[in-house]
Image (tube, helix red, strand yellow):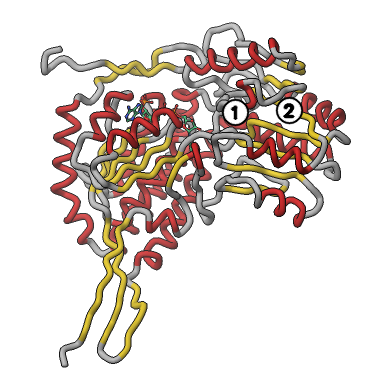
Amino acid sequence: MTKRQKVTLKIINPANGELLKEMPEDSPADIAKEAQAARKAQPGWASKPISERIAILQKFRELVVLKGEALALTLTDEVGKPITQSRNEIRGLLARLDFFLQNTASELAEETVFSDQGMTEKIQHEPLGLVANISAWNYPYFVGSNVFVPALLAGNAVLYKPSEFATLTGLHIADLLYEAGVPEEIFHPIVGGGAAGAALLEQDIDGVFFTGSNSTGKKVAEAVSRRMIKIQLELGGKDPAYVCDDVDIHHAAVSLADGAFYNTGQSCCSVERIYVHSKIHEPFLEAFTAEVKGYPVGNPRDEKTYIGAITRPAQLETLQRQADDALAQGAKLHCGGKRMPGPGFFFEPTAFSNVNHKMELMREESFGPIIGIQEVSGDEEAVALMKDTVYGLTAGVYAKDQARAERLLARVDAGSAYWNCCDRVSPRLPWSGRKGSGAGTVLSHYGIKAFTKPKAWHLKQPV
Ligand code: NDP
């Protein structure tokens, strides 16, 4: 390819297959130029008082409120997310912004930790410098803002690579940040697919904050492994929930169906495996299936739609493979089971029982509207099955007794534990995956300091 030829990125509406926009991808040379400009500009940004950066991000928040509906529509059109859920994501973004705007200054203030007889010890939180933010498409406002908001507030420059499936949203974010007063060199979106992400990793960066699949996460870790820079990986999961014998069955079924199928099942913390105590297995299945069969599927712009499009067409093959494999191995199908006819990429909301851990459905991330429900004899079997995974993002227990739920969840190696709820993220709590679900933490006070490096000051007064 000659120097001037550029790859064209086609942005497709996954709900109807229509072309939304075409645009040139950033070349490795473009990305190198952006990295150099960001590197040069970063010290100036970091030298501003933090109150100035907070005021700029506060303005960004105001612009998000002002333009919220337009942002939600773009998100719905490019990722196929039901419009009501796109609006929820914008509302959730505001809550995250509030958390960071209210807590960053105090969290990053210099700390004097010792002072006696002329000796002072203090900790200063310096920005990392230039960070790469490589992001997923399923909640672009959430997973993006978990990184770029605290990173910018802390004084870093950010090269932000949205997923190619959420490019328009990524560009909206950049435009609003510029309108709010963030200099273009300090936050720069990189347009392109995996190759652009790989080119970004070759730049002189001080940190990588990646959200995506386990397999790409490994590639990212390998690409920077010899550089000794900060790396955080927020990866996928195969999140389990256990329903004890003493719950309100209808309430648990409705809550877990929502946890499994919200965002069309395309959430990192979607419930992907359900274990139900044998005493209530049958009525639970009935209530769960009735709930799922009632979900309106279709045009994501329709206010009533609950199940939207599958964003990446390749995921349809994964879902069909998992459904076919489960059926071949003796699973019982309660609803759905196959791709829906086009236009657009849709998969029927699907629920199986009589499943086991030999099935891919119960082992590998599905990332779509499909679930396996397994009957268990009691707490011990449920915990053993919940633990039987290479992932460790979240786990939940539905039970009357909090102590019973906490006892069981303490034995599961997962970053988040839920009692009588699921598929939930709070800006006040750390968000982190264990084992194959990642390394590092975003949100909470951990997710503010993550974008800094501590400097330890040992200060002795002259005698
Ligand atoms: P991918 O791993 O496919 O992609 C993630 C990002 O990495 C995209 O921007 C992608 O670009 C980019 N990329 C691809 N190849 C490379 C490479 N070689 N070097 C650098 N960057 C690269 O994930 P998805 O976008 O499909 O997101 C879904 C996954 O993300 C699921 O597994 C989900 O569970 C996980 N996730 C985890 C979250 C968490 O907090 N733990 C939150 C949200 C999602 P492009 O898309 O343009 O190819």
Res. 162 image quadrant: top left
Q: Is residue 42 left or right of residue 193?
A: left
In the rendered image, the quadrant that contains the N terminus is top left
Residue labelled with disc 1: 265
Rendered image: mark on residue 373 = 2
In the rendered image, the quadrant that contains the C terminus is bottom left
Q: Could one spot residue 434 in this view of the protein? A: yes
Q: Secondary structure at mark 2?
A: strand
Q: Nearer the viewer, residue 302 or 265?
A: 265
Q: Is residue 136 left or right of residue 237?
A: left
Q: Quadrant of ligand 1?
A: top left
Spatial distance from mark 1 to mark 2, Cα to Cα? 15 Å
Q: Secondary structure at mark 1?
A: helix
Rendered image: mark on residue 315 = none
Residue lying at the far left in this picture: please name it: 3
At which x and y percent is residue 208?
32, 42
At which x and y percent is residue 48?
22, 61
Q: Could one spot residue 305 in this view of the protein? A: no
Q: Is residue 43 above or below residue 302?
A: below
- Mark 1 or mark 2, earlier in chain: 1
Q: Which kind of residue does numbered mark 1 sit on? A: Gly
Q: Which kind of residue does numbered mark 2 sit on? A: Ile
At which x and y percent is residue 19?
39, 13
Q: Is residue 359 above or below residue 121?
A: above
